[in-house]
Amino acid sequence: MEETKVKQLYTSVEKTKKDSSNEELVKRKIIENTPFEVITIDGKSFGAMGSYRVTEPKETIKEVEKELKKVTWDRIVQVIMILDEVKNKVETTKNK
C-alpha cells in the first residue's frame, strides 16, 4: 500500500504545509477491504471514514491500522451513524 500526498482533505482534517519547502505534511493511507483510511499529520496518525475521524491520534500508522481492523460493537455503531449522517446530507442536497 503506498502513501499519497493530499491536496485537499475533509472538514475534520486541516491541510498543513512546511514553511520552507512548501511540502505537504498530510498523508493518507487507505486500508484495503475496509471503508477506513489512516490520516497522518505532523507525525500523528488517526483513522478516518470519509470526513469523519473514528479513532484517537496514535504515534504510528500500525497502531491505527490494528485498532481499525478490530470489529467491535462501538465501531459498528460508529459506522452506522456515519452512514446515516451521509445519507441525510445526500437527501438534504437532493431536496434543495
Image: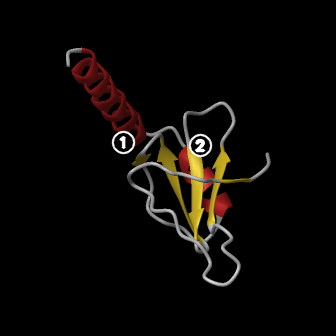
Q: Quadrant of the image for the C terminus?
A: top left
In this image, 6 relative to 82: left or right? Answer: right
Mark 2–mark 1 contact, CB under 8 Å?
no
Identified at 61% across, 74% down, the residue is 43
Residue 41, by quadrant, is bottom right
Local packing at callout 2 (Cα closer than 10 Å; few below 14, some 14-19, many 20+) is: few
Image coordinates for residue 37, horizontal then vertical, percent: 58, 45
- The foreground one among 8 and 61 is 8
Give me the disc on residue 17. none
The residue type indicated by label 2 comes to: Lys
Give the CA distance from mark 2 to mark 1: 13 Å
Residue 40, by quadrant, is bottom right
In this image, 39 relative to 75: left or right? Answer: right
Q: Disc 1 on helix, strand or loop?
A: helix
Identified at 47% across, 40% down, the residue is 50
Q: How many marks?
A: 2
Give me the disc on residue 69. 2
Q: Disc 2 on helix, strand or loop?
A: helix
Which residue is labeled 1 in the image? 74
In this image, 56 relative to 28: left or right? Answer: left
- The foreground one among 74 and 18 is 18
- The foreground one among 72 and 2 is 2
Image coordinates for residue 68, horizontal then vertical, percent: 55, 46
Question: Against 74, is 20 above or below?
Answer: below
Q: Earlier in the sequence, mark 2 or mark 1?
A: 2
The residue type indicated by label 1 comes to: Asp
Identified at 38% across, 51% down, the residue is 11
- The foreground one among 25 and 76 is 25
Identified at 36% across, 28% down, the residue is 83
